[in-house]
Amino acid sequence: MTASLSGHMSALTRRRLFWPVTILIVLLLANLLFTPDFFKIEIRGGHLYGSLIDIVRFGAPLIMVALGMTLVIATRGIDLSVGSIVAICGALACLWISGQDDQNSVAGVLTAVGLALGLALVLGLWNGFLVAGVGMQPIIATLILMVAGRGLAQLITDGQIITINSTPYKLIGGGYWLTVPFSILLALGAVALAVALTRRTALGMLIESVGGNAEASRLAGIGSRRIIVMVYVFCAFCAGIAGLMISSNVSSADGNNAGLWIELDAILAVVIGGTSLAGGRFSIGGTVVGALLIQALSTTIYTVGVPPETTLLFKALVVTVVCLIQSPAFRAKVFQRRRRPSARAAAREKTKVEVAP
Amino acid sequence: MTSLTGRWPGLRRPQRKYIPVLATLSLLAVMYGVGAVRYEAFSDGQVILNVFVDNAFLLVVAAGMTFVILTGGIDLSVGSVVALTTMLSASLLQEQGWPPYAVLPFVLFVGALLGFAMGCIIHYFEIQPFIVTLAGMFLARGLCYTISTSSIPITDPFWTSMAQSKVRFGEYFVSPSVIVALVVVIVGAYVLSHTRLGRNTYAIGGNPASALLMGLPVARTQITVYAISGFCSALGGVLLSFYMLSGYGLHAVGMELDAIAAVVIGGTLLTGGSGYLVGTVLGVLVLGVIQTIITFDGTLSSWWTKIVIGALLFVFILLQRVIGARKAR
């Protein structure tokens, strides 16, 4: 009885999502101690309100960026330039809208969105070309745009912060649609689309196979290069949407600070979600949990009343703990040393048998 | 690879391994030439020395980064460790009343310890350097803010004397920081080219698996390079606090990118195993000269620096690819 229970437990802890979800739940429960009505969600003035809604709402840009990043990392790549793309897209959209006579015109806003996302696609194509066409290491190829992109964003805004006053544009990041914040719907839609495309078609498997071994995949008849270019374009597109959300939420574009460090948060979310940086497998669900975990962490720190600047400290702690727990070498060295070797072997046999069916 | 043939240079392909460094050198010469032609005061020798004065801390940090990148790793924590060092020095000097001779070794030790810890996690738990040093980056920045969220000015006499004194030769002068930075570079270059540690560093970057099979101390070397990088970041932080005379959690934001850019422009391969410290010095100078030209011009806005650095990164990585492709053939 106890043996089978421990067997079930260890099977559970071996699940990829077990640790991130557990930490997320612990974090949310911890909030309950400080704010008793933390889990309360209410409808006020036709809009959904509540701390949980806020976590998802403010986490939406991060979810978008991390979503694109997941697919890039699955091909054994990395995209450092997303933060710059966020800034560039926000800047371009705000610049276009601020130049309109009527900032509230829907057509003008749609053009701005179209222009910004179009530029994002071009930037993604550039990254993809450098990685797949020229054959640069992804970390370096995207470093170029990460450095130059900040300059480009400031070039677009002319070093100023562009403020706009446009109701239709405000909807993207700060508005509500059918009582739900629009940014949540956008993020949900993007996640659903990505899951459908990768898990309902062969695309996900192709991406994983390219990440496992790009050359072998090419020899097996997969268009490795095309897939790599595609994931970078997708990643830039997601970052572009995130850029629109961020700039729309504050109705302004700041070439210097918009999306600063979001690439690191996104990579963090992906890693926490159990996608290996070595490529070859990915979990979109894990990424969403990872992004929510990071956002919940920031929210918790605000509600607990710790100085918000120390968020970084907790982030460091969470990254280290999650990465250590996920590292097979760490588990082998720390957890199994405590048990007797024979008992360990026996336990392993048992779990194997129970996991098999 | 390079270290093995280093003693007998030029047997088969004489200059090939020096091409990236030579390219950087010629770029620097061209940029300096353009500057000298366009702006009258530019040809003054003091302008070049000022590039050193303004970038001494970056030089030290980039030297440490070169070690890490030569092993094929990366250290994203350097900027934060620099900030932490300025903060720690300022707080210990001003608020705790420590004497300078106690503060200096202590902050250097903290930097080296952080690097050592990250190296241990990277090696023993087999987590990517990228993620570990990212956590280190968050940790060091976070620690800054636990000390104080605002800037702490430093009024210690030793610090101010280091900030204001000038090492003169003839009509030119440099700050003491430049001397420290040059000593670091010379020691670093000696270690890389003439010691066992240096050869092991190149060997691990060339191919970690064969380095292990050859019986080289991979663990010790890998941890040492991160400790060196941590130490250099802390020293860079001390030099920055000489320069700024303050400790602040927002000092050196994004410096890791500058350091990586300097190393890459200096011709070191990011996959590890090939590169020279002198290249890194040239890389830092290139970044410094770009800034100087933009300052001299006056009509160019500061963001052009970033765009130009990005473009240079692109050109140099492309160059590395071309050379690498030729080598493979």
Image (cartoon, coloured by chain):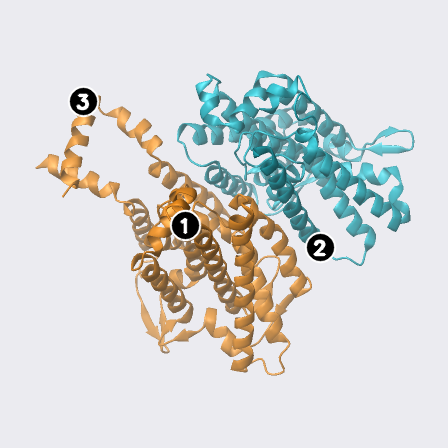
Chain colours: A orange, B cyan
Mark 3 and mark 1, same subunit? yes
Name the residue located 35 percent from the left edge and 77 percent from the top edge.
A178
Q: Number of marks in the image?
A: 3
A75 relative position to B248: left or right: left
**SS of the residue under disc 2:** helix
Between disc 1 and disc 2, the foreground one is 2
- Amino acid type shown at disc 1: Ala
Specify whether residue A298 is in view: no
Residue A120, above or below B186 = below
**Residue B87, position in %: x, y?**
61, 39
Name the residue rendered at 54%, 67% in the picture. A118
> Dot 1 lies on which element?
helix
Nearer to us in this view, B192 or B166: B192
Q: CA distance from mark 3 to mark 1?
A: 37 Å
Residue at 41% across / 64% down in the picture?
A: A57
Q: Which mark is residue B302?
A: none
Quadrant of the frame with the C terminus of chain B: top right
Residue A354 position in % (x across, y down): 14, 39
Q: Position of residue A246 (x, y in %)?
A: 51, 64
In this picture, residue A334 sits left or right of residue A213: left
Q: Which residue is mark 1?
A: A269
Quarter of the picture containing the N terminus of chain B is top right
Residue A342 is tagged as 3
Disc 3 and disc 2 on one polypeptide chain: no
Is residue A181 visible in the rendered structure shown here? Answer: yes
Which chain hosts label 1? A
Q: Label 2, on which residue?
A: B304
- Residue at the far left: name it: A1
Same chain for the residues under marks 1 and 2 in the image: no
Which of the 4 image quadrants contains residue B153?
top right
- The tag earlier along the polypeptide, 3 or 1, is 1
Side of B172 relative to A265 (left or right)? right
